[in-house]
Amino acid sequence: MAVYLDPPLWPAHGTHFSHLVSDTSLEELHAFARAAGIPERAFDGDHYDVAEARYSDLVATGAVPVEGRVLVRKLIASGLRIPARRRSGSLKLPLLNRWNDVLPGHDALFLDLLDRWGEEHRKYHGRTHLLAVLEALDRLSAPGRPPRTVLLAAWFHDAVYRGIAGEDEEESARLAEERLVQAGLPADEVDEAARLVRMTADHRPDPGDGAAALLSDADLSVLGGEPAAYSRYLAAVREDFAHIGDADFAAGRAAVVRQLLELDPLFHTARGRELWQDAAWRNLRAEIA
């Protein structure tokens, strides 16, 4: 039985926050928090958010200091973790850890992107989709890791989302160009990340374009889910376009599915075809039928 505390890396309200979790029970966690004077409002489902100023005191009180990824593993093993895909708002910790792997030291940019991906009108094209694309890139690149430009393109590829095909991708690419230049990235990396974002408008990477193939396959990986997961994806997409009538949505969606069925190949990496192609064809054909 132990209570764990990760480093204060989460930026908010002019400071940084740590996360406090139990590896045994919420009762243990709440008891520790009460004894330490942590207010109830700091509880967020399966952890407490605690300000950087409290870090040393909490360690002295008995919290075990661990790295963020160790804390996540402890929380998962405890059975207390609220699954990320059940609450998009809970994704700040896994997304922050991934951001710090690709572009550490740029907290303001991270917060801006997180806010964009968390906009209220997004149902499918939200933080859950962002994390799913990043996780798909991990699977496609294992045992290595994706190039930084591919990861940055994933972070920006739907950063602007109003449901206007082509325009969203172009504005997202322009945002990447602006913000990555401000972050001090080399011009060739900025240009490459923006190019990859623009590619997601049609998911037609050129032959031999390995970076674009990775991002395209990761972005379309949702098509290769199990039938129940695919149904949830369709329901979320419909919510994204709740302002459109049923008949117009059905016509527009049918056109999108036909375009996807015409892509040859649908997945451009050998690993992507192995992971998702058969299921994707099944799901798309069943939908159009």
Image: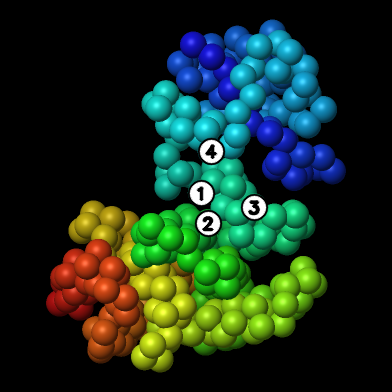
Residue, disc 4: 69
Say which element carries label 4: helix
Examine the rendering and report whether any part of residue 99 can be seen.
yes
Q: Estimate the x, y position of residue 225 in percent, counting from the top left.
A: 26, 60
Is 265 located above or below residue 19 in the figure?
below
Name which quarter of the figure residue 258 lies in.
bottom left
Placement of the C terminus among the 4 image quadrants? bottom left
The residue at which mark 1 appears reads as 88
Callout 3: helix, strand or loop? helix
For disc 2, the marked residue is 127
- Foreground: 75 or 48? 75
- Secondary structure under tag 2 reads helix
Q: Give the label, 1 or 4, closer to the camera.
A: 4
Of the numbered discs in the image, which one, if any, rests on residue 100?
Answer: 3
SS at circle 1: helix
Q: CA distance from mark 2 to mark 1?
A: 6 Å
Say which label, 1 or 4, has the lower sequence index: 4
Q: Residue at x 40, y 64 (%)?
A: 141
How far apart are the alpha carbons under marks 3 and 1?
19 Å
**Of tags 3 and 1, which is closer to the observer?**
3
In primary-sequence order, the first of circles 2 and 3 is 3
Residue 175 in view: no
> Residue at image x 17%, y 70%?
278
